[in-house]
Image (spheres, rainbow, N blue to C red):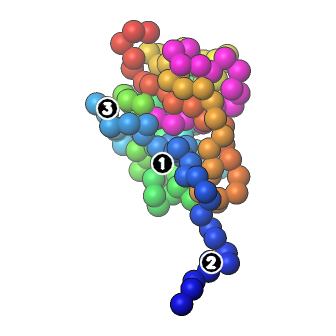
């Protein structure tokens, strides 16, 4: 008896990660905030900021005073690529995560992290992210749809040497 697989959904190599995934099991901290953007929701794997001083609601984007961390992947909302408005968002505030980057230019291990003020995608030219460094070069990671990719790199939040 022989078996054959005519429609193989698996590739020959597994992707090293996906956007919004913790990079390792180092000591980290995850807080929960409510998504607050009726039009867009909160994108997985990008920098997020509070909607106001002391607010427990967040939106995409980097801010020198309101930034809180990176929105983590969630198995319920992961296929959507975002958390809908008013849902609970897991936010990594300390640790390492595979984060979306908008440009791989200058993204190397040890480079200071910056992020876009509106989209929250990481780069080396936007708003400075306090105590954050890149821990890898930028690579393309396969998205949950199994077809498209997102440029991403490992970001370490609250690095004591920055």
* The label number, if any, that marks residue 5 in the structure image: 2
Characterize the magenta stretch by its predominant secondary structure: loop
Which secondary structure lies at badge 3? loop
Can you name the residue that lies furthest to the bottom here?
Answer: 1
Q: Residue at x 54, y 40 (%)?
A: 45
The mark that comes first in sequence, 2 or 3, is 2
Which secondary structure lies at badge 2? loop
Which secondary structure lies at badge 1? loop
On screen, 129 above or below 58? above
Q: x%, y% of residue 124? A: 64, 17
Q: Nearer the viewer, residue 100 or 69?
A: 100
The mark that comes first in sequence, 1 or 2, is 2
Of tags 1 and 2, which is closer to the observer? 2
Can you name the residue that lies furthest to the front here?
Answer: 1
Side of 137 relative to 33 (left or right): right
Which quadrant of the structure image shows residue 59?
top right
On screen, 142 above or below 131? below
Span colored in magenta:
97-111
Q: Nearer the viewer, residue 1 or 153?
A: 1
Q: x%, y% of residue 88? A: 41, 50
Question: Which residue is label 3 attached to?
Answer: 26
Q: Residue at x 52, y 55 (%)?
A: 78
Q: CA distance from mark 2 to mark 3?
A: 39 Å
Of tags 3 and 1, which is closer to the observer? 3
Q: x%, y% of residue 129? A: 51, 19
* The label number, if any, that marks residue 73 in the structure image: 1
**Residue 130 in view (yes/no):** yes
Q: Give the quadrant of the C terminus.
A: top left
Label 1 Cα crowd, 10 Å radius (few <14 / some 14-19 / many 20+): many
Q: Residue at x 44, y 25 (%)?
A: 156
């Amino acid at each position: 008896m022989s078996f054959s697989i005519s429609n193989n959904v698996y590739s020959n190599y597994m992707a090293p990660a996906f956007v919004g995934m913790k990079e390792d099991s180092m000591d980290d901290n995850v807080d929960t905030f409510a998504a607050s953007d009726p039009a867009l929701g909160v994108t997985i794997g990008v920098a997020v900021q509070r909607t106001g001083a002391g607010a427990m609601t967040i939106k995409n984007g980097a801010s020198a005073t309101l930034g809180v961390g990176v929105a983590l992947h969630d198995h319920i909302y992961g296929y959507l690529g975002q958390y809908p408005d008013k849902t609970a968002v897991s936010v990594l505030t300390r640790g390492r995560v595979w984060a979306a980057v908008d440009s791989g230019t200058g993204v190397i291990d040890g480079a200071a992290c910056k992020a876009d003020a509106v989209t929250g995608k990481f780069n080396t030219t936007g708003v400075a992210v306090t105590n954050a460094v890149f821990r890898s070069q930028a690579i393309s990671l396969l998205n949950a749809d199994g077809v498209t990719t997102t440029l991403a790199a490992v970001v370490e939040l609250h690095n004591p040497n920055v």
